Amino acid sequence: MTQTIAPTDHDRLLIIDFGSQVTQLIARRLRELNVFCEIHPFNVVDEAFLADFNPKAVILSGGPASVIDANSPRPPARVFELDVPILGICYGQQVMMEMLGGKVERGHGTAEFGRAYVTPEAEKLDLLQGWFTVEREQVWMSHGDHVSKIAPGFKVFGTSPNAPFAITADTDRNFFAVQFHPEVHHTPNGARLYENFIRLAEFKGDWTMSAYREEAIAAIRAQVGDQKVICGLSGGVDSSVAAVLIHEAIGDQLTCVFVDHGLLRKGEAEEVVKMFRDNYNMPLIHADEQELFLGELDGVSDPETKRKIIGKLFIDVFQKHAKEVGDATFLAQGTLYPDVIESVSFSGGPSVTIKSHHNVGGLPEKMGLKLVEPLRELFKDEVRALGRELGLPTSFIGRHPFPGPGLAIRCPGEITRPKLDILREADAVYIDQIRKHGLYDEIWQAFVAILPVRTVGVMGDGRTYDFACALRAVTSVDGMTADYYPFTHEFLGETATRIINEVPGINRVTYDITSKPPGTIEWE
Ligand code: XMP
């Protein structure tokens, strides 16, 4: 059975997942309301699980199945006997109706995908406080089947042209069922529904980062005792916050290993080492392994080969330096909640490997280490909030993500030291421009890629034959999809001029306007 990880004295909300693409968003909306919730796939939620989890409210997610099909996913009937408020969304609504005595039918002209409008019935519903201040509420629908008869005890509170039972409720039992998805952006007033739902369920709203900090520290102390912990520090937000939190819990029992593979940005190694060693007085091994990595990468152009080499060397080097710590029993990792959900999801993760992402996976087994993962319950923005709570500098917390293989995947073709130096300089100018124009926080990630072509130019009275580079900047919420950032022409022109003037070795600048998909964020 999937273990729940939250400290037990929080009010807890259980989201039973039927495989909707947007289940994670439900959890996001609730966490924003200071409610602790966990997502668990329907097939692990049985009576024993419910007793153990002891939810104060339950949400049944959407999902791709049809309740009409034999063997379609169900929650245990026990869920309706817990005497707690329940909200069924889309498939969750249909399964609820079916199990409680209503009826669901196949689409045939009643399917609805995309924007729809719900109008209210005469009777008011507490769940809908703050709704219908306009004549009709915009919602996001995505359903083939529809409820054709509601279960005994339910009444209708909202209808849409193709969903006469768009909002229904059994107010005696605090059971609510909606055909649309209140968690998505395209249901603009959706957050209000969640707010009302948790108010009706009498949640205290006790999930705050300062409370979490205290609990996590106590949990780390209990788990680790007087043993030693090692932590791979990449300079990224997740591993940094994990390190600072663990250090606060166990002090010098923690040693961090920072591997400098020679593929870092300008000044990055110094910045990270200074911050952790000087500001936090944390035991830190600064492993300067540039020769090793760049040596092994010499002459390699294939992106996957680069990734494989870096991934393997990283493990070797980490292992070598971890030995210096002596008898460490634990390895700390900055695993986040979305990774946890992905790994337990019954529908599984992505099926095609687009890129071999580099991480320290495989290390714990190889080294016989146990894991400490204090961020396992958190979403990225919660990690940032925790970082602020722990006093990490805002500029550090707001940093754009940086990939494990570093500049190697921003240098298509062969990687050479001169190219890396040029790339570092150009990247520094570009990021400086973005910061100066106050755009850094609007952008998910921005960087320069140095292209494996040289082009002819003219500077002063002379001919140049230097590298071309591409600027990349994207907006995204999770890195899974992305759009290019719409800089003004003035910004692009000014930046190109600065790079060409200030960075010897580059004489042409282009801007990458590919979204993801079809592109990826990184160039390799
Ligand atoms: P792509 O290029 O796949 O990138 O669209 C999506 C996000 O993931 C980051 N990325 C990585 N992060 N190890 C990491 O830790 C990797 O191997 C890796 N490859 C890509 C990328 O920077 C972007 O934020």
Image: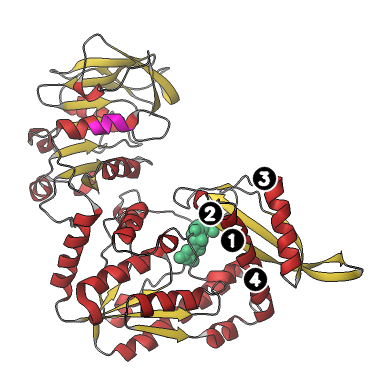
Q: What stretch is highlighted in magenta?
A: 191-195
Q: Quadrant of the N terminus?
A: bottom left
Q: Distance between the residues labelled 4 and 3?
A: 23 Å
Q: Name the residue under label 3.
A: 488
Give the number of marks. 4
Q: Does the residue labelled 1 lie within 8 Å of ligand 1?
A: no
Report x, y in % for residue 463: 89, 70
Q: Quadrant of the C terminus?
A: bottom right
Q: Give the amino acid type for the residue marked by disc 1 in the picture.
A: Ile
Q: Name the residue under label 4.
A: 425
Q: Does label 1 or label 3 sit earlier along the sequence?
A: 1
Res. 90 image quadrant:
top left
Report x, y in % for residue 368: 26, 81
Q: Name the residue under label 2.
A: 440
Q: How far apart are marks 2 and 1 (CA)?
A: 8 Å
Q: Give the amino acid type for the residue marked by disc 4 in the picture.
A: Glu
Q: Is residue 306 left or right of residue 258?
A: right
- The residue positioned 85% from the left and 65% from the top of the image is 457
Q: Distance between the residues labelled 2 and 4?
A: 18 Å
Q: Give the amino acid type for the residue marked by disc 2 in the picture.
A: Tyr
**Secondary-structure class at tag 2:** helix
Q: Is residue 514 left or right of residue 365?
A: right
Q: Mark 1 points at which residue?
A: 431
**Secondary-structure class at tag 4:** helix
On screen, residue 119 above or below 245: above
Mark 1 Cα-neighbour bin, 10 Å: few <14, some 14–19, many ≥20: some
Mark 2 Cα-neighbour bin, 10 Å: few <14, some 14–19, many ≥20: some
Q: Can residue 353 be seen in this view?
A: no
User: Which residue is farthest right?
Assistant: 461
Foreground of the two, 153 or 259:
259
Q: Distance between the residues labelled 1 and 3?
A: 16 Å
Q: How far apart are marks 1 and 4 (CA)?
A: 10 Å
